[in-house]
Image (cartoon, rainbow, N blue to C red):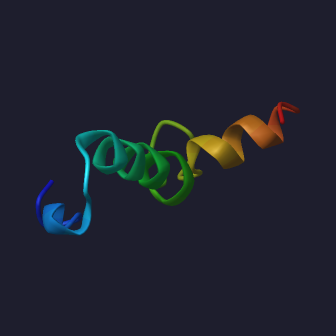
Amino acid sequence: MYIDFNQNDYVTVEEYINAIIDNHNNYRPSYVLNYKTPIEYRTQLGFQ
């Protein structure tokens, strides 16, 4: 986890966790979702 996110860039733990969640939902493709990100998959299903 430290490799992906420089912990010194964040002032609070909440800010750090939000950055991890944003990265996971918007930029990391998942094998289970046919290599789509969770946001792409939900958009494909019609959710906004």
Q: Quadrant of residue 42?
A: top right
Q: Residue 9's quadrant in the figure?
A: bottom left
Relative placement, left or right, of 11 versus 45 is left
Residue 19 seen in the current view: yes
**Residue 18 location in percent, x, y?**
41, 44
Which residue is painted at 65% across and 44% down in the image? 39
Residue at 35% in and 48% down: 15
Location of residue 31 in the rendering, given as x and y in whole percent from the top left corner: 44, 45
**Residue 41 or residue 47, whichever sits in front:** 47
- Identified at 59% across, 51% down, the residue is 36
Q: Position of residue 14 (x, y in %)?
A: 32, 39
Asked if residue 30 can be seen in this view, the reply is: no
Q: Where is 13 relative to 29, above or below?
A: above
Left or right: where 33 falls relative to 3 = right
Determine whether 43 is above or below 10 in the image: above
In the image, residue 45 lies at what x, y percent? Answer: 82, 32
Q: Is residue 26 left or right of residue 3?
A: right
Pick the residue in front: 39 or 8.
Answer: 8
